[in-house]
Structure formats: structure tokens, C-alpha cells
Amino acid sequence: MKMKFTALVAAAMMAAAPALADLVVPNLSYRTGPYAPGGVPYADGFQDYFTLLNERDGGIGGEKIVVPECETAYNTEKGVECYEATKGTGALAYNPLSTGITYQLIPKVTADGSSLYTPGYGRTSAANGKVFSNVFNYPANYWTAASVAVNYLLSENGGDLKGKKIALVYHNSAYGKEPIRTLEELSKKHGFELVQLPVEHPGQEQKSQWLQIRREKPDNVIMYGWGVMNAVAIQEAANIKYPMDQFIGIWWSGAEHDVLPAGDGANGYKSLTMHGTGMDYPVYADLKKYVADAGKGAGAGDQVGTVLYSRGMYAAMVIAEALRNAQAIAGTSAVNAAQVRDGFETLEITEARMAEIGLPDFGQAFKSTCEDHGGPGMARIQQWDATAKKWNLISGWIEPDMDVIQPLIMEDSEAFAAENNIEPRCN
Amino acid sequence: MPDTFFYATEVMLNGLMAGVMYSLVALGFVLIFKASGIFNYAQGVLALFAALTLVGLQDGQIPFSHVINAIFGTDLHNFGWTLPAVVAIALTAVVMVGMAILIERYILKHLVNQEPIILFMATIGLAYFLEGLGDVMWGSDIKKLDVGLPQGISETIETATYNWFGYGFFIDKLDIVAALVAAALVIALTLFSQYTKYGRALRAVADDHQAALSVGISLRFIWVLVWSIAGFVALVAGIMWGSKSGVQFSLSLIALKALPVLMLGGFTSIPGAIVGGLIIGMGEKLFEFSIGPMIGGATENWFAYVLALLFLVFRPQGLFGEKIIERV
Amino acid sequence: MFYREAGDYKTSYPEDSQTFPIKFDRIRYYAVLAVAFGIIPFFINDYWANAVFVPFLIYAIAAIGLNILVGYCGQVSLGTGGFMAVGAYAVYKLMTAFPEVSILIHVLLAGGITAGVGVIFGLPSLRIKGFYLAVATLAAQFFLVWLFNKVPWFYNYSASGQISAPERDILGVIITGPNTTAAAKYLFCALILLALAWLARNLTRGSVGRKWMAIRDMDIAAEIIGVNPLTAKLSAFAISSFFIGVAGALFFAVYLGAAEVGESFGIQKSFLILFMVIIGGLGSIFGSLAGAAFLVLLPVFLKNVLVGMLGWPTDLAAHIELLIIGGLIIVFLIAEPHGIAQLWRLAKEKLRLWPFPH
């Protein structure tokens, strides 16, 4: 039995191992478990973009991209298994879409020399490239999101939030607790009152939180939720008749499946986004032509154009650009993990480049440096239109308050460096 | 401060309502435990499965379409019909009965007379199985369940209470429906078990398996019956919770909310499930309201268990459970 | 033929009461040790260590711990995940507070701290029994998870509440952190498992174990013949929690390297370990090992077959995996409710008579 098992696994590993010359970008996705509704569209978008590059351009710089998919079910142990299973295949970059798995992979990728790309999630203080050499979280992160939300509210309220009351409804986990420090600092700075309302996983029952909101009548509610918590929160907000346009979710609380269950009640709900919304971008025509119509789409193919699909595609696009950049620096198309890391570190995405790719004005322009792996951290606001069942962008790019965030990033990353004896780089 | 008092009352009322929702899940546990001594962990997953089936039938989704597409390369998703809610609920109930028959035939029959913990594990195995089956059959995306139940704040109550007390109470319409349904369910179950032949047989089995067998009651039939009823209760719970949050995987986790209710009310008592639910619902909401802010909130998950634990220290068989008599 | 008592004369009491009275068993036991410590460390790579062996060894420790409580003392507990969290957070605090002390001492201390917590949550067992107790231990599970999530002191005030294991060594060999070699991880866990399994085996053979079993079989009767239920039950909780705490410490420090309490030590963990104990066999050390092996290997095996060999989509494979695991658990319980250990015993019984069964 044991022998047979060994043989089978060995055979499986052989079958899964791609030819070494290919560029390998594993897709650590989750299509099962409590967070599957969020994981499926993201994984589809991620997969489809690389399929598009392979089908349309023959890969990047002539090298095919291989995207082995591995199911993590948002579970850290399975995440470890997936990492170990794929790292021997010459994997260049990881994007696990889970804060928990990200925390585990940070030391591992640093030791193994590959890169971890976590746009808008993961460990925020990884933006400090001096400490986190192999982790990149541009263009935006949890803390800039909190600051963007507050800045948006500032602009709505004529630049003054004094005496206002803002409630934070958050998933009571590592992810949800991220913005608290930032918001506390901001509340000191701008003089608003912060009410914290944690929601326990999975968030099916939020009656007490929303009763409290109904009673305290905060001027605004900011939500950091994921999974079923989003849908329930929006439903409860609609139930207590909380004005939806004063309710802002982070980008992980702003997908179609979060608002659809609440029906018309969700009309006017706002959320942050770090990329454009809808399908009015030239790249979608290509995706349809080369991927969907060719029958090569990932998953069931019913997620194309949704918010999280776009986000998966955006992450894939950034990774593809980093690979391209790495090829340019290294002068070879068959880049290795160390060269890809350099590609990430010196990556610059301009508006012109985005337009070239077929995503004009989709994401923000940013430039990574040795010190700064975090990008400018801007975001836009989108609003849900329940009758048309679509998200509309209602603001331009809003900048975060880096004066508040930067010291927090330094503090947290330096604490990590001290705990793990990491010498700061980039000197 | 009357305002605080009213708010506390409001929290309490909503806690009672939430408690009814927990009771709906707990009822299924009690039915099965009473009749067969099985602690059915799969009750939450049964609710998920029932809700998934209901939505699937209603929207005319093709079962196993994902597998079929993966194997044959087809692109099937829908039959292209939508069923009226009542028909879909009836069909789902039939499916749940079929499931009860299968469970009895392939699992329970083989595990007669095993220790309780073995039966408990078997139901966890069943839970895994149904989770996988539900996903394979209907897909794992989030689904909207709409059988026409009202939702949102009840304005009548709000304005009425505002006129009386100067403070508008918030009561969710869905919760009112849930309370009515739960009441109807309990009355129906009581009538059924008191006044029908099968109901009496059910109680006989619950009292003493062997004595029931010896007077000619078919244990297997009773088990199918009780699992069917539990399946139906799961369907009701699935509809209520599914209307609230959409139907997806997390629905199966509501079982965890029902466990403290069971402890408190006793595993064998239907009124216990209701009263336990009310106490737990009210207790956890009031605790969150009064003590929660001092210690950081999100206390509901554990407080329910601690509350039940405190009750148990004084009454080890739960409030309404049968007295445990131990003999050497 | 070769597996029998006949002809194996014992001439002293120690010989008569040894753990493996049959010669063949002894040889097999030493052979397993030789393979585990003499061969595997030289061939192990990162994948095998991190995906198969290290989780298996750690779960085996936890399963032995829970088996002491459930299988030997008859107290069903669903608080395992919470107790593992105590071990993990204790080792984290110790590691960061006293970096110069050896990690082995930290792991054992973490186990000791968990034992103390276990005793506190074991107190209700003096009054509450059966499933009521099982559900009552869930109070420990949820409360501990909430506590570690809520009180910033436990995670050194980091922004998100995640804890990460820094690099620590024993006598210059790195045991935790990303630069650990596969062999070091494996050997560290294997040695601890060996020591603890040896301890558990001997405890359960001695007077302590007999008291536990008396309580399990009927506590009132046990009380009448002079077993103190207070000390027996609480000692079972303490020792069981010690094992589970050590497992939790290793789980965080050696295996995962970073953990978040709700995710890594949630209620699923409690159920998973209870599964291992029951599938493996209640009241059997070997059963705990077999159960852990079964539930760690099976998903990895199924995944590699379904995705790696058959090339199915990952989501379909994951769903089918659930179907198969659920189905297998039921089949197993129907075929042999007393677990893998019972199958093993039956096999040995057959072997004893072979080749002349009549």
C-alpha cells in the first residue's frame, strides 16, 4: 500500500511537472469551502488572463506560461501543501488570495527566493521593501484602503469630520483587524469617533451589531468583510434602513454576490476598488475571442466581467508585466525566480502601458523601488445600481494619507525584522 | 435612562427572535436524538443540502451539470424553467424523504446497537459526504433563495411602538415569520406525536427500543420517518437562514449555533429546544450589549456555550432533559 | 508460525511485563524505528516533510493525547483545537521572550501550560457527562479562540494578530523558521512523538491508566472500589492537554511557521482529531498513529490522484474528495466500529494461528 502510494505520487508529480523552460505561476485558488464564492471568480480571471497571453501572444517573450492550479480551500495547511507541491516545478510567483496563507509563505518564499504578490491583501507592512525583500503588495493595501475611505468621507463632508461618528464593521480575524490601527490614528487626526463592531466568522448572525448601529446612528459605516459576512451585513443594513450611500465596504466587500442577495435593498451601497469595473475594456474582446469562444475558459465561464474576476485578471496582468520586466533586465526569456524577483522590484506600470495591454484607465500607475513595495495605495469608489445590477465608478483615484500610514508600516515591519533578525536592505 | 431601557428591551426581543432561528435547527437534532439516540451532526449540512436543492429546483438548475460538463465537454446549466416556490418546496421535501430512506438503508441499519460516539462519527462522515454531494450537484457559488418571505424592518411595529413609547422598535419581518413557522412546527409535531398512530409509535420507540420492537413496531420504519421529519425541519431551517444570507457553504455552520441550545434545553425535549433557543438567543445578545463593549465584543460565539455550561453545572441533563439515573 | 507466544519463555518479571511480549512484535517495532530514524531522514525532501510526515507526526501526538482522554478515560472532548492554540501561543510567547533558551524546553513548557488550562476546563467533567460534556468542552474551544484573537498581548501587539515563528535552534541545528531542513523538522517531531508515545503507552499500562479505564467503564463503580474520580479525571485532562499542547506548539512553530488562531485552531481541528482517534481505535496508541496517518495521507493521496493523475479540475476534485472521505468514514465505521486498531488486532489473531487455523 505504501509503495503503491509512493509510486502514484511520484507519477503524479512527474505528470504535473511542466517542461523546465516554461514560466510557472501557480494559482493557489479556492473553489470550495466557505469562501468559494469569492475564490472562484478570482481564480477564473487569473487563469484566463494567462491563457489569453498564451493563445494570443504565444506567452511572454516567446515563453509559454504554465499555471498549475492547486486548491487550498482557504486553509493554511492545504496552502503549505500546495506551496511545497509547486515549488519544485520552478514556480516564480505566488498569489494565494488569503491573508493567512500569505503570512505563512512570507518566510518561505524569502528563503526559497521566489516572489509573493499580494495586491490589496496579505501583510500590509510588507510594503517596506527593506525588510520584506520578496513580498510585493502594490498597488494598494488594507491600511491605504482605510485611509482612502476616510479621505473620501472627508471630501464628501467638505474636508471636516469633526464630531462625526464612523463605525467599522469587521471580520474578527487577522484580516479584519488590519485597519483598526490606521483608523484610530486617523480618528485622532480628524477628530471623528470610531466605533468598532467585530463580527465572528462566518458572520451569519449580525443582529447585535446592526442593532447597535441602528441605535448609535453613525454617520458612516466602513466594512472589512469577506465571504457570507458581506451579504448578511448588507442585508441587515437594508433591514434597519441604514442609508446605503453612507455604507462603504473595502474592495473585498464589493462584489456582485455580496449585494445581489439583498436585492433592491442594496441599491446605493458603495465599495472601494483598486481597478476599473465592468467590461468596457478592449481586453475583454480578446478574452472572449481567444479564451471563451475557443472553449479554453477556466471554471464554468459564468464569472467573466465580475468584480473579482477583474481583480484576478489584474493580479495576473501585474505578474505578467513583472515577468516581462524580468526578461528585459535579465536579457533572457527563460527567467529564474531571482530574476523575477528583480522584475517585481523594478516594475513600473504606466498609464500608457495599461492602455497598450487593453486596460486603459483600469488600474493606477505605479512604480516599485527597493524600499517601496507598496505602491501609491490609491483607490476609487464604486456604487451598486440594483436595478441595472451593475457597479458604477463614482470617483476618480483617491490618495491615502501616507503621513499616517508610513510610520505604522515602519513600526510593524521593524518589529518583524527585530523578531526575526532581518538586516534592512537597500542601503 | 428610559432610552437605554428601551434599547435593552429591543435587544432582548431581537435576541428572542434570533433564538427562534437557533431553535429551528435544534429541533432537528432533538427529533433524531429522541428516537434513535443519535447525535446527528449532519443536521446543519442537511439544512444546507435542502436549501441548495430547493434553489436548484426552483431555478431549474441541472444537477451535476459541472461534472457532466467536465466529462463530456458540454455546456449545460439550466433546464430553462422556474418552478413556483410551493412546488419546489414540496419536491424538496420528497427529496429529503428519499434521503432519509437511503440513510436508513445504507448507514443506520448497519450500525444498530453501536456506541453513541460511533453513531455520532457516522453522522460526521455523512456530513462530509453531503457537503461534497451538495457542491458536486449544485455548484459552490452563492445563491439567492427567494420563496416570497417578507424581509426587513416591520414598519407597523416600529410606528406603533414609537407612538406608545417614543422609541421605535426594530423587528425583522423574517424573524416574525420564523417565529410563526416555529410555533406551527412545534404544534404540528406535538399533535402528530400525541394523536396519530405513527406519532405514538415514535414515542414508544423513544421510550424504549426493545419494548417497542416487542409490541411489533418496525424500528426501521420509525427511523425513516423520524429522519424524514428531521429532513423537513432542516428544509424549514434552510429556507429561513437561506433567505437571510443566501445559500452557500456557511449555512452548514448554523449547526454550531444549535449545540448550546441543545445542551441547555436537553437533548431529548422539543419544548427544551424552543425554550433553550430563546434563553440562548436572549442571553448572548444581552451579554454582547451589556458586557461585550467592555471586553472587545464578538462574544456571541463563546458566550452561548459558557451560558449553557453554567446551566449544566446545576442541571447536568439540561433544563428539560430526562433525569440521568445511574446504577452500578 | 513465527508469531506466537509458545516457546518464548520468560524467566524474569521485567521480561514478563514488557510492552511487546511477542518476539516478532519486538523485532517489528525495532525495524520501524530503524526505518523512521535511520532511513527516512536521509531521503526526505521538503514536499514529503511538509505535506506528509510532519503533519502526520504532529497529529499523531495530538491524537494520542485525545485518545488518553476519550479512549482511556471516557471523557469526550471537542476542545482540542482550543488546547492546541494554547500550546501554540504559549510557545510563541516563550520563543519571543526568551530567544536564547532551547526550543525543546519551550515546547515542553508550552505543553505544561496547556496542561494547566486543560485542568481548568476539565473541572465541569466532574458533573457533566456524555454528549453534554462534549458540547461543554466546545465552550473551551470557542472561548480560547476568542481570547487569543482579542488580547493583543498574546500576539505581541502585531497589527493583524497573526503570529510568526522566528528562527530557533537546538545545539546549532535550526528547528523553526524557513531555513529548517526537511530532515531536522522531521527528526525533531519524530523524537518527540517517540518519547511521548512511550510515555503514554507506559502510563496507560500502569496504575494511572487502570484508574482511567475504571472511570471510563463505569465511574460510580470505580468510585466504590476506591478510585478518586477527581484525581483520575483531572489527571487525564492534564496529561491529555499536555500532549495536545505540545502538538499545538509543534504545529505552529515547526509545521506552519505562522498561524491565525481562528483559522488554524478552529472547531474543524477538534473534529479532525476526534476523527483520527475514533477511526484509529479508541483506547489504543497504535490506533492513534494509524488514524492520524489515515486522515493525513488520504486527502493528499486523493488530491494527487484526482488532480495530478486524472487531471480533473481542482474544484471538482476537492468536492469528490469530500464525498470519498465521508463515504470511507461511514464504510469504515460499518465494517469495523472499533477502528483500525481492531483490524490490526484481528490480523494478529489470525497470524497467531497461521498456517493452522484449526
Image (tube, coloured by chain):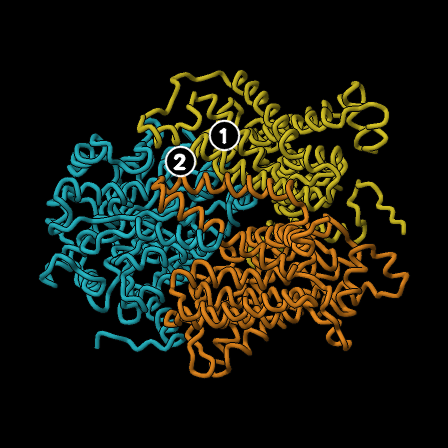
Chain colours: A cyan, B yellow, C orange
Tell me which chain the residue with mark 2 is part of.
A
Between C102 and C158, which is closer to the camera in this rendering? C102
Q: Is residue A39 left or right of residue C299?
A: left
Residue C199 shows up from this direction? yes
Count the marks: how many?
2
Residue B64, position as x, y percentages in the image: 43, 28
Tell me which chain the residue with mark 1 is part of.
B
The residue drawn where x is 41% and y is 41% is C317
Between C357 and B32, which is closer to the camera in this rendering? C357
Q: Secondary structure at mark 2?
A: helix
Q: Is residue A393 above or below residue B73?
A: below
The residue drawn where x is 43% and y is 42% is C318
Determine which quarter of the picture holds residue B191.
top right
Q: Which mark is residue A259?
A: 2
Residue A118, position as x, y percentages in the image: 31, 55
Q: Amino acid at mark 2?
A: Val
Q: Amino acid at mark 1?
A: Leu
Mark 1 burial class by Cα count in 10 Å: few <14, some 14-19, many 20+: many
The residue drawn where x is 40% and y is 62% is A104
Residue B26, position as x, y percentages in the image: 67, 37
Same chain for marks 1 and 2?
no
Between A15 and A235, which is closer to the camera in this rendering? A15
Determine which quarter of the picture holds residue C51.
bottom left
Residue A298, position as x, y percentages in the image: 29, 38
Mark 1 — residue?
B52
Between A11 and B27, which is closer to the camera in this rendering? A11
Determine which quarter of the picture holds residue A163.
bottom left
